[in-house]
Image (cartoon, helix red, strand yellow):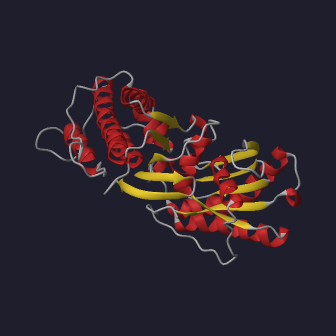
């Protein structure tokens, strides 16, 4: 089967054509994949502006689909279905992708498949191995998500816990802005942290000793602000940091985030008795996070699957999870709607 998958949940306009056999376990081939990033559009705001993102998707969705089909070297009539991420995400962004997918299904008389963006991030791990990754603990860590799920298979999951305020990636962006670094904040903080001392500052690690499988990064972000401003101050106006101070603050902040993420992932494994951990999302590209996860999983004799670097950030290749829904006969009518927001329990 051949499926065109569309991804417009936030600020990447992406399309991919994936192919696989009809039987479960057949390998997935990526015939074409195109991602149009909007980083330059949101750079001055140091964060995603929903209205700008939606307008950019409108401009880019058709050219991205066209380039993907050209890359795949097939005709649209050869497709077996069209898949689109309809939850969770930004309302305007989701709507652009859904309308494009519905139009194609109507014109081509092909079935429509709904993709849950969070499930897809975990499925990206499956695309990097021939071994089954389910059942497992699935951890999605990105700009909008820091959540833990128990995945019984590719399309059935149970929510275990997540952030009660900022997501990890969002905290990286905000701290990067405080430190005068660029956007996106994750890669920038990681870059300067390489030359810093992660023990220079003792930042809070919320809930790390509690049984609840939740995260909170708002207090950590505030602690960094106080550290930059100085004792008894909150304003950053007029504050000038040298390169050593920036590096130490970045390294100490990153260490606190990573400690929280790794600790809760291992706690989820212990509570459920599962022995596989799957991790996806933009923050999964963080080098220190990957190293700490590998070490913790090795010590706990847990099998770790992390999405390959090229599939950590939003892309349409991970929409290959639609293959699993196709095999299960899970198609949607053309009155399918978006389900925006940040947290959606996969169904």
Q: Which residue is nearer to you in this view: 204 or 290?
A: 290
Classify 297 as above or below 313: above
Q: Which residue is nearer to you in this view: 76 or 223?
A: 76
- Can see residue 13? yes
The image quadrant that residue 335 belongs to is bottom right
Classify 230 as above or below 113: above
- Residue occupying the point 48% across, 34% down: 304
Give coordinates of residue 53: x percent, y percent.
57, 59
Q: Which residue is nearer to you in this view: 65 or 331?
A: 331
- Residue occupying the point 61% across, 69% down: 95
Residue occupying the far left of the picture: 232
In the image, taking residue 65 as reference, residue 189 lies left or right, namely left
- Residue occupying the point 22% across, 26% down: 200
Give coordinates of residue 347: x percent, y percent.
52, 64
The mark total stands at 0
- Residue occupying the point 24% across, 41% down: 205
Residue occupying the far front of the picture: 273
The image quadrant that residue 202 belongs to is top left
In the image, taking residue 298 as reference, residue 74 lies left or right, namely right
Give coordinates of residue 266: x percent, y percent.
35, 39
- Can see residue 141? no
Give coordinates of residue 158: x percent, y percent.
44, 58
In the image, taking residue 295 as reference, residue 217 lies left or right, namely left
């Amino acid at each position: 089967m051949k499926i065109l998958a569309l991804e417009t949940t936030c600020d990447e306009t992406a399309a991919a054509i994936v192919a696989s056999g009809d039987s479960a376990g057949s390998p997935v081939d990526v015939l074409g994949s195109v991602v149009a990033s909007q980083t330059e559009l949101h750079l001055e705001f140091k964060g995603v502006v929903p209205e700008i993102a939606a307008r950019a998707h409108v401009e880019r969705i058709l050219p991205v689909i066209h380039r993907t089909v050209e890359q795949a070297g097939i005709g649209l009539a050869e497709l077996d279905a069209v898949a689109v991420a309809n939850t969770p995400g930004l309302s305007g962004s989701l709507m652009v992708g859904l309308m494009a997918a519905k139009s194609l299904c109507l014109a081509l008389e092909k079935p429509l498949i709904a993709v849950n963006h969070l499930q897809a991030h975990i499925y990206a791990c499956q695309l990097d191995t021939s071994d089954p990754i389910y059942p497992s603990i699935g951890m999605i860590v990105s700009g909008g998500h820091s959540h833990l799920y128990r995945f019984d298979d590719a399309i059935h999951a149970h929510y275990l816990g997540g952030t009660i305020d900022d997501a990890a990636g969002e905290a990286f962006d905000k701290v990067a802005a405080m430190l005068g670094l660029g956007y996106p904040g994750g890669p920038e903080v990681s870059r300067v942290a390489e030359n810093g001392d992660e023990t220079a500052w003792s930042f809070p690690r919320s809930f790390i000793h509690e049984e609840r499988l939740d995260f909170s990064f708002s207090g950590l972000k505030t602690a960094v602000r106080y550290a930059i401003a100085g004792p008894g101050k909150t304003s950053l106006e007029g504050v000038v940091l040298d390169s050593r101070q920036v590096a130490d603050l970045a390294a100490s902040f990153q260490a606190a985030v990573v400690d929280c993420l790794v600790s809760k992932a291992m706690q989820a494994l212990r509570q459920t008795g599962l022995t596989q951990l799957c991790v996806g999302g933009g923050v999964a590209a963080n080098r220190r996070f990957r190293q700490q996860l590998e070490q913790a999983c090795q010590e706990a004799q847990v099998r770790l699957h992390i999405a390959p670097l090229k599939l950590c950030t939003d892309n349409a290749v991970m929409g290959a999870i639609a293959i699993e829904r196709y095999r299960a006969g899970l198609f949607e009518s053309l009155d399918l709607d978006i389900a925006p927001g940040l947290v959606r329990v996969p169904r």
